[in-house]
Amino acid sequence: MESMKYRRCGQSGVLLPAISLGFWHNFGELTPESQSRAIARAAFDAGITHFDLANNYGPQPGAAELRLGKMLQDDFRGHRDELFISTKAAYDMWPGPYGSWASRKHLMASLDQSLQRMQLEYVDLFYCHRYDPETPLEETLQALVDIVRAGKALYIGLSRWPLEAAEKGYRYLRERDVPCLIYQGRLNLFDRQPLQEGILDSAQQAGVGFIGFSPLAQGLLTNRYLNGIPADSRMAHDPRFLKSDMLTPQMLQRIRALNDVAQQRGEDLATMALSWILQHEAVTSVIIGASSPDQLQRNLSCLKSAPFTEEELTIIQTIINK
Ligand SMILES: NC(=O)c1ccc[n+]([C@@H]2O[C@H](COP(=O)([O-])OP(=O)(O)OC[C@H]3O[C@@H](n4cnc5c(N)ncnc54)[C@H](OP(=O)(O)O)[C@@H]3O)[C@@H](O)[C@H]2O)c1
């Protein structure tokens, strides 16, 4: 087993594992409880101390938090202080005008619900899951400050916020002595928006960590779809967010070309895709999903990947620019 590496999160006191585990898929009602437990236990045994959740992870919304709550009682009893647990609010959660977005009303009520589902007194990290263009920025940010002051979260994070709003957020939070711990954004070989839009650089300059989600593009950046759509894959059995029309001939061509590069490096595509993200100094951690302990363990091999040569990086760049 690889030994986990821990990276400092921005200029904070927090170390996060280079690989974190996400509960978006594989922890809801579509997955047997025994499978979820095996994945989470394998992660913890591998030194993955950070579990990433959100109010709406399921299906049904809330199911992943409920499942973690049960695991904290059964599987991880006595280990709470070894774990760093995050949750989020701002996507659709309950009907009516307060069930979504980033008003003080929604954020406060949603976090209380999350804590109840997970049977926790506090989370380590609470995120505003998306930027709300209709709510005054100060209302959202002050609610986050007050959540920390009320002891319901130790740290605050922002997810998917546009650059300018995020920078305002970093300033507002720092001025109130609740510095933003981390920015969460999608980053993988196919989606490099945080790099291209300066989100990574600006977080680093502000002393804020960065954590990348969907590092394997939901499985596209693995050997999963090289020869069709396997029946047990996300695309086949849970196509809520990964639809088969994403697997275009052009996409398949790019996946195969990247797979060739990975093979020449002596590793599989998933390993290379994760190493490519982790080579960026401003990245604190990547949040992977895994549908089995075996997948999770194989992905850990990115921790001992060789650095990329200039030539490899140029070839990769050419492929992903196509
Ligand atoms: N902030 C946000 O708005 C946001 C949005 C999305 C996600 N997230 C976070 O990011 C986490 C990860 O997202 P994700 O699940 O999309 O991550 P991902 O790592 O890109 O994709 C995970 C999926 O890829 C497949 N896979 C993983 N390792 C593999 C391997 N070695 N070989 C073959 N297939 C492999 C599995 O799918 P199969 O089922 O096909 O096996 C697995 O469930 C989420 O759980 C959540 O915590 C946050």
Image (tube, grey):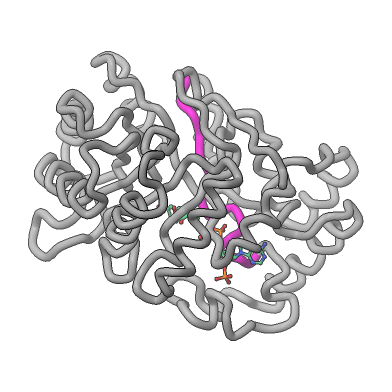
Q: Residue at coordinates 45% horizontally, 19% vertically from top-left?
A: 12
Which range of residues does the magenta coloring cover?
A: 207-220
Left or right: where does residue 225 sit relative to residue 159? right
- Per the image, is 267 magenta? no
Q: Quadrant of the C terminus?
A: bottom right
- Whole-percent x, y for residue 80 in the image: 36, 38
- As drawn, 198 above or below 314: above
Left or right: where does residue 42 sit relative to residue 28? right
- Whole-percent x, y for residue 310 in the image: 87, 38
- Nearest to the observer: residue 75 or residue 33: 75
Residue 213 appears in view: yes
- As drawn, 98 above or below 141: below
Q: Residue at coordinates 18% horizontally, 50% vertically from top-left?
A: 116
Question: Quadrant location of residue 4?
Answer: top right
Question: Quadrant location of residue 267?
Answer: bottom right
- As drawn, 60 above or below 231: above
Q: How many marks?
A: 0
- Nearest to the observer: residue 136 or residue 64: 64
- Per the image, is 211 magenta? yes
Q: Residue at coordinates 15% horizontally, 45% vertically from top-left?
A: 112
- Whole-percent x, y for residue 115 in the image: 21, 46
